[in-house]
Image (cartoon, coloured by chain):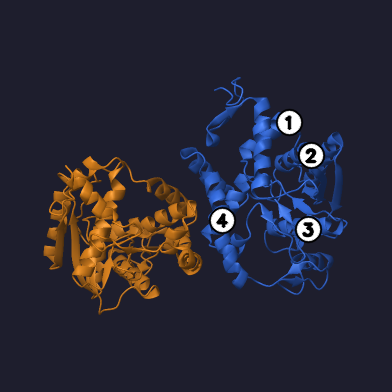
Chain colours: A orange, B blue
Amino acid sequence: MKCKRCKATAAVALPSHHAGFCEECYDLFFTRQVEKGIRRQKLLTFEDRILVALSGGKDSLALMLVLSKLGYNVTGLHIDLSIPNSSEAARGVVERFCEKHGFKLIVKEMAKEGLAIPDVKARLNRPICSACGKIKRYFFNKTALDEGYTVLATGHNLDDEIARLFSNTLRWDLAYLSDQGPGLPAEGGFARKIKPLYRLSEFETANYSFLQGIEYHYAPCPYSQGASFTQYKKLWADLEEQMPGRKLDFYLGFLERGKEVFAKHEETHGDELQPCEKCGYPTSAEVCGVCRIREAVSQD
Amino acid sequence: MKCKRCKATAAVALPSHHAGFCEECYDLFFTRQVEKGIRRQKLLTFEDRILVALSGGKDSLALMLVLSKLGYNVTGLHIDLSIPNSSEAARGVVERFCEKHGFKLIVKEMAKEGLAIPDVKARLNRPICSACGKIKRYFFNKTALDEGYTVLATGHNLDDEIARLFSNTLRWDLAYLSDQGPGLPAEGGFARKIKPLYRLSEFETANYSFLQGIEYHYAPCPYSQGASFTQYKKLWADLEEQMPGRKLDFYLGFLERGKEVFAKHEETHGDELQPCEKCGYPTSAEVCGVCRIREAVSQD
């Protein structure tokens, strides 16, 4: 197979784009897809101060690198979950990455917040994943607002977004469907959030990271027993193989036609949020989920 | 495995209902699912004069039989498509079935209407399936209205409905999503339409037909090159195997929550229909699709 652009030998084959690219042109392809995604959904301006959530995985590091290369003003945010072995390794990857590229990095240590994940896990009667996600989103939001960033960016790729959209659709969860998408405006105590890699598959991001020589953390979390979205991702991989381009069609079709219908419905039917009595974070209860977790952990 | 109801040896296993049934109790299960479907979606009353579309396949014959056993007033309608070998066999099955059970049967012969499917196929530059479907729906509707039936019933089962819903959702086709469901009210020149088997899978209907000793026509149409929904059905079969009950959840969730959102959107955004200039059938063009096909066939 030859590179679609320069006719050199292709290094990456992309059936969903009916194309293959050499290393150099792949970089260009990836970068242009990110630019296109930002432009189509009006995600960013060059005036934005962007806080990029860096887990240490390939997606978030690729996002940070590509945004910086495009000339955006980026700062990294790493949440140190204090999980033995795992968190230390992830943090090391993020710190080395930011040092290498001269990126500013903020690290929030959950142990210092009374929210070390092993302690949370010990107090919880249900799987840790949803509480851990809640804690991370809480500190993403809080850090962005407290430290004056105009937007929070996460490295969710097309496969992540498809699995979530598919799961929300299977359950016809109108509230979740109404605000899924690559851009979520700032609203009632929430920072603006964006997912600039939404047009790129996991395979495409992995290739970019590999070709850019990014060292990343890939050990699965020791607490996760195979994420719930895994089987949806497999199903969609099969569908994509049979009908290349189907994933992007489903997601972009949702953004173009589906989403507004759900959003309109939720305008009149959605839950009202109010500030948490303890910390001010938006919640539908009196005290937010993270304050309740913190309370439970402290009652030892 | 034992019958969930009477503890005899089970003849049919139904993982999605966490149950197995013996022959007799399976009949009861199937019948009750049909009754439940009719009641939940208010599909029928005992005053209705029901025209049941009978292709000769297991689903439509099972539907006719179960509705009749439940005491509903049913008449069969068979569309003879005039496809060599195939149509003759299907019509024979339907005629013998209706004779055996003493059901009234109306047969519409497409050859007499200038719409024999081989002639249509010869004039068409695209696959025949969509034109054939259009012609069948046209005569279902016309016969129901012309001959004073209050409702038209078709044998679509849960798998048919899931494949259609999934296809409409993948494309985010808001117009199709707004009026998919087991009951479609009479409206602007269209007869009321119902699908009373919407809660029952293809496997469940096949079992019912088998246990009731229904002789049915199962040769695939010689013109169909593997229906487009086949791969969606396979995908859903895998999903159902991994998570029993997922199909019914997806469909019922759509009916309970999703559908109204799309219907509300279409109220303000949908296409206006008007009567066809030639035959009066509702259409968004001046002349309806079937009249255009008929014209093309007659220009020989």
Indicate which disc residue B167 carries. 4
Q: Nearer the viewer, mark 4 or mark 3?
A: 3
Q: Mark 1–mark 3 contact, CB under 8 Å? A: no
Query: Do circles 4 and 2 both sit on a common chain?
Result: yes
Residue B24: image x %, image y %?
68, 26
Of the pair A2 and B101, the residue shown nearer to us: B101
Q: Mark 2–mark 3 contact, CB under 8 Å? A: no
Dividing the picture into quadrants, the one containing residue A11 is: bottom left
Of the pair B161 and B216, the residue shown nearer to us: B161
Indicate which disc residue A279 carries. none
Query: In this rendering, is residue B282 above or below B155?
Result: below
Which residue is labeled 3 in the image?
Answer: B141
Query: In this rendering, is residue A177 above or below B271?
Result: above
Q: Nearer the viewer, mark 4 or mark 2?
A: 2
Q: Which residue type carries mark 1? A: Gln
Q: Mark 4–mark 3 contact, CB under 8 Å? A: no
